[in-house]
Image (cartoon, rainbow, N blue to C red):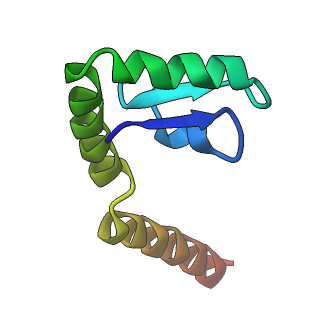
Amino acid sequence: MPVVATVSGGAEEVIDDGTTGILVERQNPHELAEAIASLVTSPERPTCMGKTGRERVEQLFDLSKQSAQFEAVLERVANSHKRS
């Protein structure tokens, strides 16, 4: 299922507007309604967006990958302090 969200709170980091979901401006109910309606009137679009969105999240926000990246940062910091 695709996501319709407002441009705030980091949603734009997760959602690729038009590909994995739709981003709308905050406090704009008309734009929000249009975005939702565009998904309802095109049944294949939500399926495609949902699939692409899931792939994006799995690729960019996988917990094991993020943990490994965080561990690498900690190791670099620890090693830089050992040299000092």
Q: Residue at x 64, y 45 (%)?
A: 10
Question: Is residue 17 in sight in this rendering?
Answer: no
In front of the other: 56 or 84: 56
Q: Quadrant of residue 12?
A: top right
Question: Is residue 36 in sight in this rendering?
Answer: yes
Q: Position of residue 30 (x, y in %)?
A: 69, 18
Q: Quadrant of residue 47?
A: top left
In front of the other: 24 or 30: 30
In the rendered structure, the answer to whether residue 83 lies left or right of residue 1 reads right
In front of the other: 40 or 35: 40
In the rendered structure, the answer to whether residue 55 lies left or right of residue 53 reads left
Q: Residue at x 31, y 71 (%)?
A: 64
Q: Residue at x 55, y 16 (%)?
A: 34
Farthest residue, direction right: 27
| Image quadrant containing the N terminus | top left
Relative to 67, say whether 53 is above or below: above
Q: Position of residue 24 (x, y in %)?
A: 63, 24
Numbered disc total:
0
In the rendered structure, the answer to whether residue 73 lies left or right of residue 61 reads right
Q: Position of residue 49 (x, y in %)?
A: 29, 30
In the rendered structure, the answer to whether residue 63 lies left or right of residue 15 reads left
Q: Residue at x 69, y 78 (%)?
A: 84
Q: Position of residue 11 (x, y in %)?
A: 59, 42
